[in-house]
Image: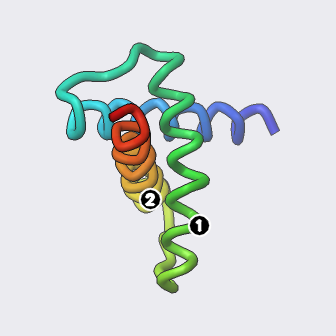
Amino acid sequence: MVPDLIVYLAVGAVAGWLAGTLVKGGGFGLLGNIVVGVVGAFLGGVVFNFFGVGVAGLVGAVIMATVGAIILLFLIRLIKK
């Protein structure tokens, strides 16, 4: 149970950092990266499922979460304008 939570938070942190780096040129700090990454993982799961794409393993989870986090940051940027 606890190791799974640690893995989820680590994937979220990595995905949030990657998305922040790709979209705005920098991360959001540890807590911000985790939040963006975890919400992005959920969004990425919905989008990947919609298109019938499956992922496997830790690398697949990071890719899916990063794609979702990029979509999330793009949507936030649209709403802010």
Q: Which mark is residue 46?
A: 1
* Outermost residue to the bottom: 52
From the top left corner, tell me how far across and down residue 1 is, in percent: 82, 39
Nearest the eye: 11 or 16 = 16
Above or below, comparing residue 67 to residue 75 in the picture: below
Secondary structure found at label 1: helix
Q: Residue at x 71, y 35 (%)?
A: 5
User: Where is residue 14 shown, x and y percent of the image?
Assistant: 40, 35
Numbered marks: total:
2
Q: Which residue type carries mark 1?
A: Val
Looking at the rendered structure, the kind of residue marked 2 is Met
Q: Position of residue 52 (x, y in %)?
A: 51, 85
Residue 26 vertical position relative to residue 74 in the rendered view, above or below: above
Contact (Cβ within 8 Å) of mark 1 with mark 2: no
Give me the residue at 48% from left, 83% from top. Answer: 51
Task: Classify 54 as above or below 11.
Answer: below
The residue pinned by badge 2 equals 64
Q: Is residue 3 left or right of residue 8?
A: right
Residue lying at 34% horizontally and 46% vertically, measured from the top left:
74
